[in-house]
Image (spheres, rainbow, N blue to C red):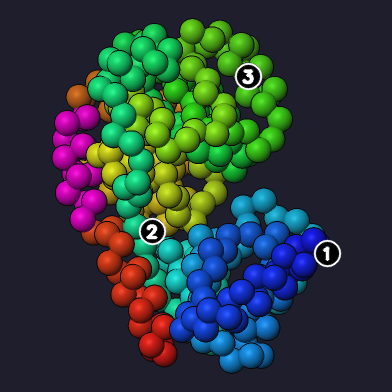
Amino acid sequence: IAMMLRVAKRMDAWAEAQKPDLTVFKYWMPFFAPSYNAIVRRLHKKRVGRTCFLLDNVIPHEKRPGDDFLTRLVLEKVDTFIAQSAVVRDDLLKFRPDAVYREVAHPVYSLFSAGAEKSEARLRLGVKTERCVLFFGFIRGYKGLMNLIKSLSHVQKDVGLLIAGEFYEDDAPYKDEVKRLNLENRVFWHDRYIPNEEVGDFWNAAEAVVLPYESATQSGIVQIAMNYGTPIITTNVGGLPDVVKDGEMGYVVPPGDPVALAGAIERFYREGKEPEFRAAVARERSRYSWEPLATALEEFARGGR
């Protein structure tokens, strides 16, 4: 904490020297609260423009003692907020009923590489099954990867699972479950940080991405899927069903239910939904441009409410 506060002191001095109209912070967990709080309060005291929190989450997925105290503390002096889903908006208003905010959906990520075509991408990534679904992103308990692994045992054997992302917890239970279910030849591990220039290969290698989350507010993975036009199979948690139109862009299933998840994957392939869903995802992409976010920030910088 002492180191974070020292860094915060240098950062707020730098921010003050820039004389910004608006200082924007990306916020998603109370870990950042001490340093962000120090910067926000100094800028507020010095009357240096306004501050804005771009909120992925208000309440963390994995709660720890003191989270509510730190969250309330850091939000107290912030001038404006961008809530990236209705769930985040509602959580914000529990802590700051008087908050000045805009609800703006997460824009589409378009900075990643195009990647190789499917056969080359699969060769590079070691995918050996005829068909393949993708799990992409940090691996944490609430993201439900264990349920997805279990679901694979109920899916036809020509479907594999490509896993791309770093573990934020012990990997042993996941890999032990793959062995227990005899899925070693159908699960393709890339449990590491995926640099931008490699991202396209993973998305091109799969017919669909699966978000088996047990809890969520929204997810940047959906916006990456929109960039690549990839069908989405997700769970009915947080703001995900508001973005993923069930039966049009993919399927929405109950959380914590490997059998239901398997049923959605089976149906996707059995009914040949990939072309239809890809077209729908591509059409939906235009609704998630960066313009609404830029407009909201400009309005806050000019003093808007």
Frontmost residue, 46 versus 136:
46
> Quick check: is 128 in the magenta stretch?
no
Mark 1 crowd level (few <14, some 14–19, many ≥20, 10 Å Cα): few
Q: Quadrant of residue 138?
A: top right
What element does badge 1 sit on? helix
Q: Disc 3 marks which residue?
A: 175
The magenta segment is 273-286
What is the three-letter code of the residue carrying label 1?
A: Ala
Looking at the picture, how far across and down is residue 169, in whole percent? 69, 35
Q: Disc 2 marks which residue?
A: 106
What is the three-letter code of the residue carrying label 2?
A: His
First of labels 2, 3 by sequence position:
2
* 251 left or right of 238 in image: left
First of labels 1, 2 by sequence position:
1
Q: What residue lies at 61% left-to-right and 11% top-to-bottom?
A: 179
Frontmost residue, 241 versus 3:
3
Query: Which mark is nearer the camera, 3 or 1?
Result: 1
Q: Quadrant of residue 191?
A: top right
Task: State how far apart marks 1 and 2 are (Cα).
Answer: 33 Å
Q: What residue lies at 45% left-to-right and 71% top-to-bottom?
A: 82
Circle on res. 203: none
Looking at the picture, how far across and down is residue 28, in whole percent? 58, 60
Task: State how far apart marks 2 and 3 are (Cα).
Answer: 32 Å
Q: Disc 1 marks which residue?
A: 2
The number of numbered discs placed on residues in the rendered structure image is 3
Residue contact at pointers 1 and 2, CB within 8 angstroms? no
Q: What residue lies at 58% left-to-right and 76% top-to-bottom?
A: 15
* 201 left or right of 88 in image: left
Mark 3 crowd level (few <14, some 14–19, many ≥20, 10 Å Cα): some
Q: What residue lies at 43% left-to-right and 12% top-to-bottom?
A: 126
Q: Quadrant of the C terminus?
A: bottom left
> Quick check: is 278 in the magenta stretch?
yes
